[in-house]
């Protein structure tokens, strides 16, 4: 029989698993909502894009999105850019980090912190106040700290998102990935990379080995992005992670996602806090004949 001490020992594990399931569930809902925001606010229109430096794209640029010969990928990350993160993703990689104009129009500048937080946060995760002195009282909605009334519901903005756009190898279609975070640390220093060896045929993701110490914090349920020199970038969920041995520089993982060429060298990008990735195939609005 399991005694009280045995039950008590299981409670933290049960709480951890329940929290992880709740995060995954809310992350999926937030990703679906973010997809609607992306489309409604015309974030897929390159005319609304700016480089992380605040400079607009020009038709003659080698990485202009509509260049037929280009296969560039883009990371739409206004929250990161507003916080000073301007490097490509992965670091020194070929996925250009971009932001949005503060409003439509060629003369407008980049989004600031407040606007980026408003657009790229999931506001349905509401915060409530519980009376610690009287448990019989219902939870009360917490007001927006900067507002004098309850006109705006207050959310702690624990769930935020960014998007990656990767052009297919042929045609004008892009894979749009909405990347949802819980309590993201907006800092370039937390975007880690590791050389990645594909151990299997790469069908459905498969088994891989990361070969530096950056893999130490990966756990089942984490997400990684694989990339190569051909311009492929794909997100994968970690469904198994071998135990990390202190002092070692490699770790084996099992990934779930799209097929990957088993013979291709890859780089794994690790961003802590990702809880869900929601994908769809889209056309940039400028390339859609109905938008011309």
Image (cartoon, rainbow, N blue to C red):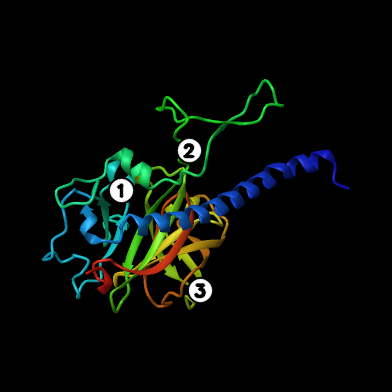
181, 46: nearer the viewer? 46
Furthest residue to the top? 133
Q: Is residue 246 above or below residue 203?
A: above
User: Mark 3 vs mark 1: which is more N-terminal?
Assistant: 1
Q: Which of labels 2 and 3 is toward the front?
A: 2
Secondary element at tag 2: loop
Q: Which mark is residue 78?
A: 1
Tell me the distance, in whole angstroms, between the alpha carbons under discs 2 and 3: 36 Å
Residue identified by numbered label 3:
204
Is residue 118 left or right of 64 when viewed as pictured?
right
Q: Residue at x 52, y 54 (%)?
A: 29
Tell me the distance, in whole angstroms, between the alpha carbons under discs 1 and 2: 19 Å
Q: Is residue 177 visible?
A: yes
Q: Which mark is residue 111?
A: none
Q: Residue 216: image x %, image y %? A: 49, 52
Secondary element at tag 1: helix
Is residue 62 left or right of 244 when viewed as pictured?
left
Q: Which of labels 1 and 2 is toward the front?
A: 2
Q: Check contact, mark 3 vs mark 1: CB within 8 A.
A: no
Q: Residue 122: image x %, image y %? A: 45, 46
Q: Check contact, mark 1 vs mark 2: CB within 8 A.
A: no
Q: Check contact, mark 2 vs mark 3: CB within 8 A.
A: no
Secondary element at tag 3: loop
Q: Residue 244: image x %, image y %? A: 54, 54
Q: Which of labels 3 and 1 is toward the front?
A: 1
């Amino acid at each position: 029989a399991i005694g009280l001490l045995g039950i008590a020992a299981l409670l933290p594990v049960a709480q951890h698993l329940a929290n992880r399931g709740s995060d995954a569930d809310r992350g999926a809902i937030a990703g679906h909502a973010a997809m609607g925001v992306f489309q409604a606010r015309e974030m897929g229109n390159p005319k609304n894009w700016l480089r992380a430096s605040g400079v607009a794209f020009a038709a003659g640029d080698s990485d202009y999105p509509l260049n037929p010969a280009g296969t560039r990928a883009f990371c739409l990350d206004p929250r990161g850019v507003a916080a000073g993160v301007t490097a490509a993703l992965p670091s020194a990689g070929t996925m250009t980090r971009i932001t949005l104009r503060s409003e439509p129009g060629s003369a407008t500048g980049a989004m600031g912190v407040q606007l980026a937080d408003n657009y790229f946060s999931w506001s349905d995760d509401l915060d409530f106040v519980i009376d610690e002195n009287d448990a019989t009282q219902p939870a009360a909605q917490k007001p927006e700290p900067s507002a004098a009334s309850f006109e705006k519901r207050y959310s702690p903005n624990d769930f935020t998102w960014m998007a990656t756009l990767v052009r297919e190898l042929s045609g004008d279609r892009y894979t749009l990935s909405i990347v949802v975070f819980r309590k993201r640390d907006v800092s370039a220093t937390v975007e880690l990379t590791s050389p990645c060896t594909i151990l299997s045929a790469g069908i459905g993701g498969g088994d891989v080995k990361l070969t530096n110490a950056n893999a130490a914090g990966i756990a089942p349920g984490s997400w990684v992005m694989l990339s190569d020199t051909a311009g492929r970038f794909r997100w994968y969920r970690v469904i198994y992670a071998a135990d990390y041995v202190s002092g070692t520089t490699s770790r084996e993982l099992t990934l779930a996602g799209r097929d990957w060429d088993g013979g291709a060298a890859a780089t794994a990008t690790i961003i802590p806090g990702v809880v869900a990735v929601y994908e769809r195939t889209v056309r940039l609005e400028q390339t859609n004949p109905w938008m011309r």
